[in-house]
C-alpha cells in the first residue's frame, strides 16, 4: 500500500546554484548532499515538512539524470511513493502488466529498498517506490 510521498526528484545542471535557490530564496533547509556513484548523480536533500525534495545533479552525461537533462532540460524528474511492502506492490504491478524498470527492489540512498516504474505506464511520470526500515 502507498502511504505517502517520500520525495520529489528534480534534475538540475548545477547543484550549488539550485541549492541557493531552494535554501536562500525559498528559505528551506538542506539536510545534506550524497554522491551516488551507481546512479551517476550527486543529490542534495531539501526538507519541506515531512516531504523531501531531492536536487539531482548528474556526474556523467550517460546516467539516467544526465540523459534526462540532455533530452528534456532541467525539471521534475520523478516522484517517490513510500510503500509498506515493496515486494507485494511489485508483484501486483507485474500481474497487471505494468512496465517495471526494476523487477526486484535494489538498495538506494540511506539503505532504502527502491524500485522504479516506467514513466510510459504512469502517464509520463517516472515513479519510484521506496520501502524504509520500520517505515520511518
Ligand atoms: N520522466 C518522464 N519521462 C521520462 C523520464 C522521466 N524521468 N526519463 C525518460 N523519460 C521518457 C523519455 O523522454 C522517452 O520519451 P519519448 O519516447 O516520448 O521520447 C521515454 O521516457 C523513454 O525514454 P528512453 O530514451 O527510451 O529511455 P531512457 O534511456 O531515457 O531511460 C528511464 C528512461 C526512465 C527508463 C531511465 O531513466 C531509468 O531507468 N530511470 C530509473 C533510475 C533513475 O532515474 N535514477 C536516477 C534517480 C535516482 C535516485 O533518485 O535515487
Image: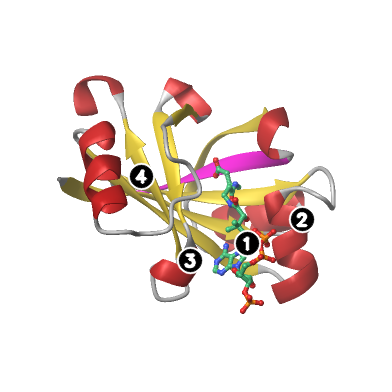
Alpha-carbon span between mark 1 and mark 4: 27 Å
Q: Secondary structure at mark 4?
A: strand
Point out the tag, 4 or 2, that comes first from the N-terminus: 2
Point out the tag, 3 or 2, that comes first from the N-terminus: 2
Task: For residue 136, say whether it is visible.
Answer: no
Q: Secondary structure at mark 2?
A: helix
Q: Which mark is residue 129?
A: 4
Instruction: Decide: few, some or many residues near mark 1? Use Cα within 10 Å; few <14, some 14-19, many ≥20.
Output: few
What residue is at 69 percent from the left and 69 percent from the top? 74
Looking at the picture, how far across and down is residue 117, in whole percent? 43, 54
Q: Secondary structure at mark 1?
A: helix
Alpha-carbon span between mark 4 and mark 2: 21 Å
- Which residue was labeled with disc 1? 21
**Main secondary structure of the magenta stretch:** strand
- 50 or 63: nearer the viewer: 63
Residue 40 figure quarter = top right
Looking at the picture, how far across and down is residue 115, in whole percent? 43, 41
Instruction: Decide: few, some or many residues near mark 2? Use Cα within 10 Å; few <14, some 14-19, many ≥20.
Output: many
Point out the tag, 1 or 4, that comes first from the N-terminus: 1
Q: Is the shortest distance between ligand 1 and the CB of mark 3 under 8 Å? A: yes
- Which residue was labeled with disc 3? 119
- Which residue was labeled with disc 2? 66
Point out the tag, 2 or 1, that comes first from the N-terminus: 1
Magenta stretch bounds: 41-48
What residue is at 62 percent from the left and 41 percent from the top? 43
Instruction: Decide: few, some or many residues near mark 3? Use Cα within 10 Å; few <14, some 14-19, many ≥20.
Output: some
Looking at the picture, how far across and down is residue 9, in whole percent? 52, 54
**Magenta stretch containing residue 82, yes or no?**
no
Q: Quadrant of the C terminus?
A: top left
Amino acid at each position: 500500500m502507498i502511504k505517502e510521498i517520500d520525495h520529489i526528484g528534480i534534475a538540475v545542471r548545477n547543484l550549488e546554484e539550485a541549492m541557493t535557490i531552494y535554501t536562500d530564496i525559498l528559505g528551506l533547509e538542506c539536510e545534506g548532499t550524497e554522491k551516488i556513484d551507481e546512479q551517476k548523480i550527486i543529490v542534495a536533500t531539501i526538507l519541506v515538512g515531512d516531504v523531501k525534495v531531492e536536487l539531482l545533479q548528474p556526474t556523467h552525461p550517460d546516467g539516467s539524470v544526465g540523459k534526462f537533462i540532455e533530452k528534456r532540460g532541467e525539471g521534475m524528474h520523478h516522484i517517490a511513493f513510500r510503500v509498506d511492502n515493496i515486494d507485494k506492490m511489485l508483484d501486483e504491478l507485474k500481474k497487471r502488466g505494468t512496465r517495471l524498470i526494476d523487477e526486484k527492489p535494489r538498495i538506494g540512498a540511506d539503505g532504502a529498498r527502491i524500485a522504479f516504474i516506467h514513466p510510459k505506464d504512469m502517464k509520463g511520470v517516472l515513479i519510484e517506490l521506496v520501502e524504509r526500515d520500520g517505515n520511518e
